[in-house]
């Protein structure tokens, strides 16, 4: 499906997110500490800011088009919270790195396949123009 251009910056960032999710999911005894270190660097420099853009810029533009009771809205915030919690807990076991990778992978898939199409079907051009202006 073709993404609305206002969502392109976020979708582009999802590509990098999927690369790091895969690395986490496939980490093993030999590379776990390096994978973890690189992931935390990526979190500080990119992913943390990506989450904020979605919560602080994208979400306000959903106002009036969504209800907070809708599962997609709840899932969006719950998934961000679950991922942040795992990152703050700072686990080093392979199990926790794999789990974190899975959560990030599933979250990006959820946004690309469910949330963003829904946003595209409900927002109007004025909203999209606003998103673009603020995200740039
Ligand atoms: Fe997100
Ligand atoms: Fe995202």
Image (cartoon, rainbow, N blue to C red):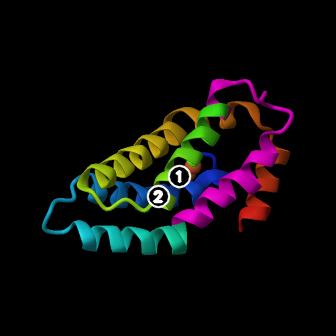
**Mark 1 beta carbon near ligand 1 (under 8 Å):** no
| Residue at image coords 61%, 66% | 49
SS class of the residue under badge 2?
helix
User: What's the mark number on residue 93?
Assistant: none
| Residue at image coords 26%, 71% | 33
x, y percent for residue 109: 45, 40
- Near-viewer residue (132 or 71): 71
Up-down relation of residue 56 to residue 82 (above or below): below
| Residue at image coords 59%, 34% | 75
x, y percent for residue 12: 50, 59
Up-down relation of residue 2 to residue 134 (above or below): above
Is residue 1 something that shows in the picture? Answer: no
Judge the density around disc 1: few (<14), some (14-19), many (≥20) Cα neighbours within 10 Å.
few
Q: Quadrant of the C terminus?
A: bottom right
Up-down relation of residue 120 to residue 104 (above or below): above
Name the residue tied to disc 1: 85
Is residue 134 something that shows in the picture? Answer: yes
Judged by its main secondary structure, the magenta piece is helix
Q: Is residue 133 left or right of residue 3?
A: right
Do callouts 2 and 1 mark residues in contact (Cβ within 8 Å)?
A: yes
Q: Is residue 4 left or right of residue 102?
A: right
Q: State the image quarter where residue 9 is shown.
A: bottom right
- Near-viewer residue (94 or 72): 94
x, y percent for residue 83: 50, 50
- Near-viewer residue (116 or 81): 81
Judge the density around disc 2: few (<14), some (14-19), many (≥20) Cα neighbours within 10 Å.
few
Magenta region, residue range: 47-73
Q: Is residue 112 left or right of residue 18?
A: right
The question of residue 49 being in magenta is answered with yes
Name the residue tied to disc 2: 89
């Amino acid at each position: 499906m073709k993404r609305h251009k206002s969502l392109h910056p976020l979708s582009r960032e999802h590509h990098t997110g999927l690369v790091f999710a895969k690395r986490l999911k496939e980490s093993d005894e030999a590379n776990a500490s390096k994978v973890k270190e690189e992931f935390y660097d990526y979190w500080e420099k990119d992913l943390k800011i990506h989450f904020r853009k979605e919560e602080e810029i994208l979400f306000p533009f959903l106002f009036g088009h969504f209800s907070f009771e809708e599962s997609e809205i709840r899932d969006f915030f719950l998934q961000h919270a679950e991922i942040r919690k795992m990152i703050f807990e700072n686990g080093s076991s392979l199990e926790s790195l794999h789990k974190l990778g899975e959560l990030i992978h599933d979250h990006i898939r959820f946004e690309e396949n469910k949330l963003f199409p829904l946003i595209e079907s409900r927002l109007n051009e004025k909203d999209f123009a606003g998103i673009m202006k603020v995200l740039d």
